[in-house]
Image: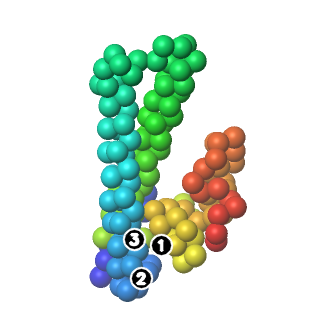
Amino acid sequence: MHYHRSKGILSLAKPVIDKNNSDAHRTRLLNLRSRLRGEMGRMADAVLGQGQTGASSMPIHMADLGSDNFEQELTLSLVGNEKEALNQIEFALGRIADGSYGKCEDCGKKIPEPRLEAIPYTAVCVQCAAIQEEQRGGDEQSPYSSHEVE
């Protein structure tokens, strides 16, 4: 028996996905987590390295300084996005451990396998993701956007 957690409530239920799929999804999530951690480390090193290269690489022209600042801000933004993805991966690994992986946290329906393959850390089905995006105003591109694979 496995305990399922839905919005903070534990329930005794059958796992949503079978053991073989669970292992495959866990492996994909662990590989993705490892890759993102490596990328975040390289980006952080690049941002920190820009400030430590010395006066010889100091931009002379204001446009160069603006470009360097833009690149640094963009890199920091990407690190933030990847940190959020890492958090979602950790939550997905927790859902695998408690047997609730593959079940939409909003409506409780099974998330279709193609969606889990496309976004292995997703916690919601396409329909609920579309509702969430609509509630946010739909002006930001969401990792759960409705044009994803269902």
Rendered location of residue 89, percent (x, y): 39, 59
Residue at 35 percent of width and 85 percent of height: 19
Observer-nearest of 38 and 21? 38
User: In the rendered structure, which amino acid carries the disc numbered 1?
Assistant: Gly
Mark 1 element type? loop
Please identify, in this view, whether the residue under mark 2 or under mark 1 is nearer the observer.
2
Up-down relation of residue 60 to residue 72 (above or below): above
Mark 2 element type? helix
Residue 66: which disc?
none
Give the class, few, some or many, for how many residues have Cα within 10 Å of label 1's Cα (few <14, many ≥20): many
First in sequence: mark 1 or mark 3?
A: 3
Q: Are marks 3 and 2 in contact (CB under 8 Å)?
A: no
**Which color scheme does this rendered protein use?**
rainbow
Give the class, few, some or many, for how many residues have Cα within 10 Å of label 2's Cα (few <14, many ≥20): few
Quadrant location of the N terminus?
A: bottom left
Residue at the spot of label 1 = 102
User: In the rendered structure, which amino acid carries the disc numbered 2?
Assistant: Asn
Q: Measure the C-alpha gap from mark 1 to mark 3.
A: 14 Å
Q: Measure the C-alpha gap from mark 3 to mark 2.
A: 10 Å
Give the class, few, some or many, for how many residues have Cα within 10 Å of label 3's Cα (few <14, many ≥20): some
- Residue found at the very far front of the displayed protein: 56
Q: Is residue 113 visible?
A: yes
Residue at the spot of label 2 = 21
Residue at the spot of label 3 = 28
